[in-house]
Amino acid sequence: MKRFCLSAMLLAITLLAACAPAASQAHTATLFAMDTVMDLSAYGEQGEIALDNAQDLIRELEGLLSTTREGSEIYALNHGETVALSPSTRELLDRALALCGDTGGALDITIYPVVRAWGFTTEEYQVPDSQTLTALLDKVDYTQITLEGDSLLLPDGMELDLGAVAKGYTGDRLMELFRQSEIASAYVNLGGNVQVLGASPDGDPWRIGIRDPDGEGYAAVVEVTDRAVVTSGAYERYFEQGGVRYGHIIDPDTGYPARSGLISVTIVSQSGTLADGLSTALFVMGKDRAVQFWRTRDDFDFILIEEDGTVTISQGIENSFSFPGEQGSYALEVVRR
Ligand code: AMP
Ligand code: MG
């Protein structure tokens, strides 16, 4: 009898396991693409096939948008070729150029010659002299690009770099793919660009950790549903020379790595492309300009971390923001409209 009870119980548990989690069955994949490690999770019956398609999509976009890969559309444009742009490249260029304009050029997708001069494309780092930078800055000006139909006119010597927006755009495309695959819940981390579809499988918002720019753990947590959470940080890619740290985000006005007092900028938005573009742009702007810019818009929130440990957040995420465990050395300010 005892044995029967146990078997019946086990059967019941197995059945529960077989039925209930079908809708929330986790499927995961990890891949290296776009120069970074990517983690993907999709929940539900269609998860596995959706993740296969997701990886194909990532590879396809990488093949179009990479600056370094021969055969990509951006590589061809940067080498003076005429290209009939694919709808994806066109769409991203269109949105990126709009963001360059919105941010007054703090984001400038023609920054590539300067990024290369610093060695960020090859990891052979160097500090260019100021004449070199002044000469290269002549070639940095997104307003000189024209995008018409499926062709883009890039003046001689100018080169594109979609590194500030490509992963964000990829996140948007993945969410679209998951939605079409009738996935209700998904999470992607594209090398620090997090984007989620719906709520987490248990129905609560997703809890996203914001990396501590000074250490290993998390500086903050934000709870979100259907959002992109994208961070740009000085700690992501940099080199040191003569005791000075040079980061990979360049101020297009000076040609030097942005030194605005911010060490980490996180943007929370429905749009991955917007979040990615603005995380880079607000890093360049610095806190005061970033806050002013935010007041002119209603399509994003931010978490700014300054060198002195001040954390500033915008009011839209006040109730979904927390410090993990101890607040530690951070002081919190909330900016309101
Ligand atoms: P993110 O990690 O999204 O902030 O993007 C940084 C990458 O974008 C860099 O590695 C460069 O390739 C490129 N980049 C750097 N500064 C800028 C800028 N001011 N505008 C546009 N792209 C930039
Ligand atoms: Mg970015």
Image: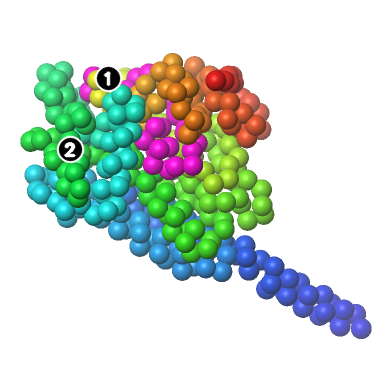
Q: Looking at this rendering, what residue extends furthest in the front direction?
A: 149
- Going from N to C along the chain, the mark reached first, 1 or 2, is 2
Question: Relative to 223, is 77 on the left or the right?
Answer: left
Disc 2 crowd, CA 10 A, few/some/many (<14, 14-19, 20+): some
Q: Secondary structure at mark 2?
A: strand
| Image quadrant where one finds the N terminus | bottom right
**Numbered label attached to residue 12:** none
x, y (%) of residue 54? 41, 60
- Which residue bears the numbered disc 2? 146
Membership of 262 in magenta stretch: yes
**Residue at 66% across / 52% down in the picture?**
203
- Which residue bears the numbered disc 1? 242
x, y (%) of residue 109? 25, 35
Q: Amino acid at mark 1?
A: Gly
| Image quadrant where one finds the C terminus | top right
Q: Amino acid at mark 2?
A: Thr
| Mark-to-mark CA distance, 1 and 2 | 41 Å
Q: Secondary structure at mark 1?
A: loop
Closer to us: mark 1 or mark 2?
2
Label 1 beta carbon within 8 A of ligand 1: no
Disc 1 crowd, CA 10 A, few/some/many (<14, 14-19, 20+): few
**Residue at 49% across / 58% down in the picture?**
179
Q: Looking at this rendering, what residue extends furthest in the right direction?
A: 1
**Residue at 22% across / 23% down in the picture?**
255
Read off the magenta span. Answer: 254-279
Disc 1 and disc 2 in contact, CB within 8 angstroms: no
In the displayed structure, would residue 251 be above or below residue 206?
above
Membership of 160 in magenta stretch: no
